[in-house]
Amino acid sequence: MKPIKFIEKIIIDQPASTVFDFTQDYSRRLEWDTSLKKAELAEGYTPSGKGAQVYYMTKWGIGMNAEYVSYNRPKVSAVKITGGSYLFRSLIGSWNYRDINEHQTELTFLYAFELRFLFSLYNYPIRRYLQYQARQSLHTLKTLLEKQADNKY
């Protein structure tokens, strides 16, 4: 079966390095990622990097183990699910940070996933929901980072 893909983008009034560092700070992840109730680096791993193991628990109770497959500050980070999910057969998420100028970043989320058999009957509504969640997280992130910038001045 062909993976289901979607892309969400947003422009944030902060430099790419600021956006990258904030999104990769697991102590702050739940402040903006509206789909999660838990996000933790596995024991023994320090700030994210290629090969780092992480654990996510969604607000709907789906736990997933993942591994960073790409980490190039401040340009890109990507994770793939390595196990623990009863919903996903596979999932990879890539986040690309592109400087528009020294004060603005275009952040692009690209997700590709395959659902396990019974869930694959609901590909369309599940994709729409995941895309909605990604969009909500991006808007929350933008609000937090731009408010944080306003408070510095």
Image (tube, grey):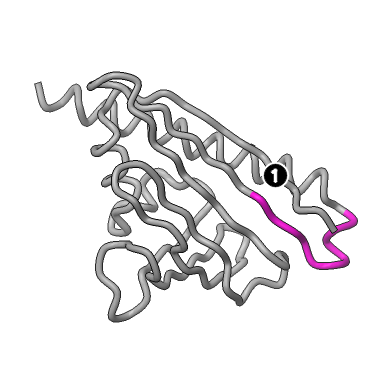
Q: Residue at x 25, y 69 (%)?
A: 46
Where 128 sits versus 118, above or below? above
In what element is the residue under mark 1?
Answer: strand
Label 1 CA crowd tier, 10 Å (few <14, some 14–19, many 20+): some
In the image, taking residue 31 as reference, residue 18 lies left or right, namely left
- Tell which residue pokes out farthest to the bottom in this image: 44
| Magenta stretch bounds | 112-121
In the image, taking residue 85 as reference, residue 118 lies left or right, namely right
Q: Provide the residue designation for mark 1.
A: 5
Picture quarter containing residue 107?
top left
**Closer to the camera in the image, 63 or 98:** 98
Residue 118 drawn in magenta: yes
Q: Residue at x 57, y 73 (%)?
A: 82
Q: Position of residue 111 (x, y in %)?
A: 61, 47
Residue 35 drawn in magenta: no
Where 143 sits versus 26, above or below? above
- Amino acid type at circle 1 is Lys
Where 19 sits versus 115, above or below? above
Q: Position of residue 1 (x, y in %)?
A: 85, 59
Q: Residue at x 37, y 76 (%)?
A: 42
Q: Position of residue 140 (x, y in %)?
A: 42, 34
